[in-house]
Amino acid sequence: MNRLYDMEPRVMDDEMLKLAVGEQGPRDEARQLAKQEGILFKDVLSLQLDFQNILRIDNLWQFENLRKLQLDNNIIEKIEGLENLTRLVWLDLSFNNIEAIEGLDTLVNLEDLSLFNNRISKIDSLDALVKLQVLSLGNNQIGNMMNIIYLRRFKDLRTLSLSGNPVAEAEDYRTFICAYLPDLVYLDFRRIDDHMKELAEMKHQCSVDELKHQESLMQAQLEDEQARWEELEGHKAAFVEHLNGPFLFDSMYAEDVEGSQLSHLPGVGELVQTYKDKFVIVCLNIFESGLKQQEKRKAELDTFMGCVQEAVQEKQEQGKHKIAKFEEKHLLTLSSIQDESELTNFEIKMAEHSEDITELVNVLVTLEMQLVEQLEETINMFERNIIDLVGLFVENVQSLMAQCRDLENHHHEKLLEIAISTREKIVKGELDEDLPDAVRPLFVDKDTIVNAVGASHDIHLLKIDNREDELVTRVNSWCAHLVDKVSAAEGREERSQEGRLRIPPDGPAAVCPADSQGRDHEEPQAHEGDQPVRRPCAERAGQAGVQRPPGLGLRPSPPPTPELHR
C-alpha cells in the first residue's frame, strides 16, 4: 500500500484546513479578495486533503454544507469526525489504514463512497447510506461471500468494486454478485452484459428465490412492527397507551408476591378472573374515551388553524385590492404632474397626491387593527375550547379510575373473607385441599394473613393511582404547553404585523416599519365611518375538523405581504 511513512503524522487542525480552503478557493483577484475577507468554512462545498499524512479525522464540524470530501492517501486508521457533514455526497477514503466501516450513520445523502486499498474485512455499518450508488472496496481483506448479500438493501447501488479482495478469487465470484445484486450495472469497472446476467440467474436461481422469500417474511415482520409502533404512538398521543387490554391489571400483579400466593386459595382463582374481566372493561372505557377526546382536540386545533389562515388571507386580499387601486390612480397622477407646467396647478396636484397616500395608510392600518382584533378573539376562544375539552376528559378519567378502585376494594373484601375462612378451616383441620408450601407460612396466625391481603391491596391501589396521576399530569402539561405556544405565536404575529401595511409620507416606494433614522412613523387613526368587519372564524373556532399534519407550527405562515411600489 502506498503510505507516506517518511513524514510525521499530522493533525487536522484549523491551520491545515484554512490552507487547503485557500488553495482550492477562487483564483487571481478573487483569491486576493478571499484572503483579505476570509472564507467561512460553512460556505465550502468541496475540500481536498489528500497526501497530507493525516492520522485522525478532526475539526470538520464547521463544514456543514460540504458536498465533496477527499481524504485519500493518508494514514487514517478510523472513520470518525464526520457526523456533522450531513450534506456530503462524495467521500474518498481510499489508500488509508482503515480496518472497519463505521462513523457514517449521519451521512444520509452520500452517493459515492471509496474505501479502496484499506484493511477492511467485513462490509457492514452502511445502513444509513440509503442513497448509495457507487461503492469502491477493492484491495481490502474481504473474504466472505455473504458480505455481498448485505448490499442487497441498497436499492440505488449501480457500481461496485471488490477486485483485489480474497472474495474476488472465488470461481463464481462474478455470477454470484450478478445474481444477488441484479440491479448492478458495473462490477470492478466493467459493465455487466446481458449474457452474464442470464448465466448468473440460471446458476443461482434457487438460492436467490429462497433468499427473496426470507426477505419478504422479514419485510412483513418489519411492517407489522412499524404498524404496532405507530398504533402505540397514537395511543400515547391520546394519553391512553396500554389501557386497551389487561396491561394495567397484569402490572398490578407483576410485583405482588402476596397476591400470587393467595391466588392458590380455594375459590380465589374464580374471584380474580371475575375481578379482571370487570377491571378490563373499565380500562377499555378509558381507552375509547381517550381516543374520542383526542379526535375532538385534533379537530379543534385544525379548525383554529383554518380560521387563522382564512383571517390572514382575507385581510391580505383586501390590502392587495386597496394597493392595486392606489397604484392605478397614483400612476395617472404622476403622469399628469409630469405634464403640468404651471406651478400653482403642480402644487395642487401634489397636495391631492399626498391626500391619496394618507388615505391608503389609513385603510391599511385599519385592516391591520381589524386582523389583530380578529386573531385575538379567535385565539381566546380556541384556548377556552381546548381547556374545556381537556377538563372534561380528566373528569371522565378520574370517574372511571374511581370505578377501578371500587372494584379493587370489593375484591379486597372478598379475598380477605376467603383468607380468614381458610385460616379457620386450617385451625379446625377441615380444609379439604392441600396448600402449596409457599402459601402455608401466611397462615401461621390471623395477623399474618390479614397483613398479606392488605399488602396486596396496597400494591394494587398504588398502581391505579400512579396510572391516573400520570395520565392527568401529561394531558394537563400538554394543554398548558399548547396554550403557551399559541399565546407566544400570537405575540410574534402581532409584532410581525408592525409596519407590514404602512406607507411613509414619502410615497409607496419607501415602505418600511421605521424611517432612515430609526423613528417609527405615527399611525393615523381609522375613519369613524369605517364599516365593522365580519368575523367568521371566531364563530367557528370550536367546530370540529381534522388535525393538521404533525410537526407543523401552530400558526400557518401567511403569504408574503404585497409590495406597495412597482
Image (cartoon, helix red, strand yellow):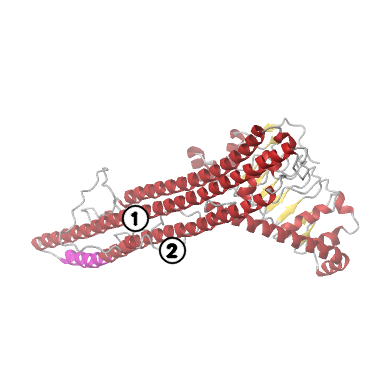
The quadrant of the image that shows the N terminus is top right
Please name the residue shown 14% across and 65% down the image. 340
> x and y percent of residue 281 in the render?
58, 56
Residue that mark 2 sits on: 545
Compared with residue 47, is residue 176 higher up or lower down, i.e. above or below?
below
Q: Is residue 304 magenta?
A: no
The quadrant of the image that shows the C terminus is bottom left
Please name the residue shown 65% across and 48% down the image. 250
Q: Is residue 131 left or right of residue 559?
A: right
The residue closer to the viewer here, 347 or 312, is 312
> x and y percent of residue 64 in the render?
56, 45
Q: Is residue 286 left or right of residue 509?
A: right
Q: Is residue 290 left or right of residue 271?
A: left
> x and y percent of residue 19 in the render?
59, 37
Q: Is residue 332 magenta?
A: yes
- Residue 93 falls in which quadrant of the image? top right
Q: Is residue 399 left or right of residue 124?
A: left
User: Mark 2 Cα within 10 Å, few/some/many (few <14, many 20+)?
Assistant: some
* Three-letter residue code for mark 1: Met
Compared with residue 360, is residue 93 higher up or lower down, i.e. above or below?
above
In contact (CB < 8 Å): disc 1 and disc 2:
no
The residue closer to the viewer here, 429 or 182, is 429
User: Which range is magenta?
Assistant: 324-339
The residue closer to the viewer here, 63 or 226, is 226
The residue closer to the viewer here, 308 or 318, is 308
> x and y percent of residue 509 in the render?
27, 56
- Main structural element of the magenta stretch: helix, strand or loop? helix
- The secondary element bearing badge 1 is classed as helix
Residue that mark 1 sits on: 381
Mark positioned earlier in the residue sequence (1 or 2): 1
